[in-house]
Amino acid sequence: MTKNDRLAEYRRRRDAGRTPEPVPDEAPLPHGDDDTFVIQEHHARSLHWDLRLERGGVLVSWAVPKGVPSDPGENRLAVHTEDHPLEYAAFEGEIPAGEYGAGKSLLWDRGTYETEKWTDREVKVVFHGTRVQGRYVLFRTRGDNWMIHRMDPPADPDAVPPPEGLRPMLAQERKRLPKDEDAWAYEFAWGGRRLLARISGGRTRCTDAAGRPAEAPPGVGSALGGTLGVRTALLDGEVARVAGTEVYLIFDLLHLDGRPLLDVPYRERRERLDALGLDGARHRTAPWFPGGDDPGAAVLDAARREGLAAIVAKRLDSPYRPGKASADWRLLPAGQ
């Protein structure tokens, strides 16, 4: 090992015979233009994003647990890590279990950047990426802990965060199916506990029917965060036992990517929810059955066969009314 080998720590942590990551032999560092950056989405023990800036023949690297901020009102933690080889700018793959950083690494963004300032305590740059663009500063706080701050106006000035402490919409009890069946959709009533899930920066926080903090089934929060990544969302669903396993069944989408959806018709909210592909071992998107060809009676029959107590009819054009029992949602007994 030569003196001042900038990749010595990188090599020490990796076994070139086991990991697909590039592990170059000790040699003079390549020369670049110090203008390449890459952000990798790293599904390791904890989901995070790795920001890497080409500098002096290596990729100077920070792990950003919640991703690069898009709004100047939110500074985010960035943990300085070991320098990586320039070849890492093209790396995607699965780091094997037992190896340092085990998990899947995906290229999330890449492009060029301009340096406005670079010291041991402060780095100011301008990103020109596909997803990340604009002026940012990284500043050291203590040890390897830095913060990253967007210096430009918000990337999306109309974006708003998901609301806090929202109480779920409720259904009114009815005895019979609606007469205008084509105007409704039908879902199973699973008989579980209500849970709203707020996902932001790859992290999930849940609240119960009263808007109080609540726990999701094991693994659900990390799975939702891993699927949605840096996207923001507010989900409505319930925790119920399905085939003997506690599962979070998701049946509504109240906020997505900085846009409130409370006033969007139920049909469109459900279509957007389906498009997210939220289906895992302990969470899944609950089925829904739009009107036509007598679906209400068919869903009632299916609920009886499965031993469920009720179904829910929801108007296709209905908004979401937080904390209210609305006639736009109707709880119908399945009977026996």
Image (cartoon, rainbow, N blue to C red):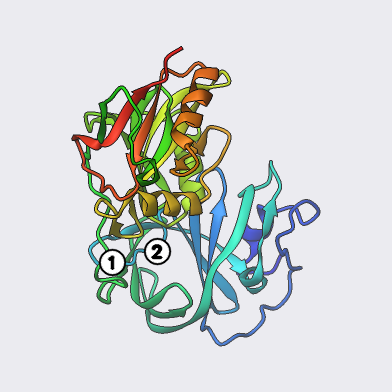
**Residue closest to the far top:** 336
Q: Amino acid at mark 2?
A: Val
Q: Foreground: 117 or 241?
A: 241
Whether the residues at callouts 1 and 2 have beta carbons within 8 Å, the answer is no
Q: Which residue is mark 2?
A: 68
| Left or right: 262, with 31 as reference point | left
10 lies left or right of 204 = right
- Residue 196: x percent and y percent? 33, 37
Distance in Å between CA atoms under marks 1 and 2: 9 Å
Where does the N terminus fall, quadrant-wise?
A: bottom right
Q: Residue at x 66, y 66 (%)?
A: 91
Residue at image position (46%, 46%) is 225
Residue 136 visible in this rendered orientation of the protein: yes
Quadrant hosting residue 20:
bottom right
Considering every residue shown, the one lying at the far right of the view is: 17
- Residue 281's x, y, as percent? 58, 34
Query: Against 261, is 89 above or below?
Result: below
Q: Which mark is residue 51?
A: none
Q: Residue at x 53, y 74 (%)?
A: 110
Residue 38 coordinates in the image, percent (x, y): 53, 71
Give the answer, above or below, for where 139 lies relative to 33. above
Q: Nearer the viewer, residue 205 or 323?
A: 323
Per the image, the residue denoted by label 1 is 71
Counting from the top left corner in percent of width and height, residue 169 is at 25, 36
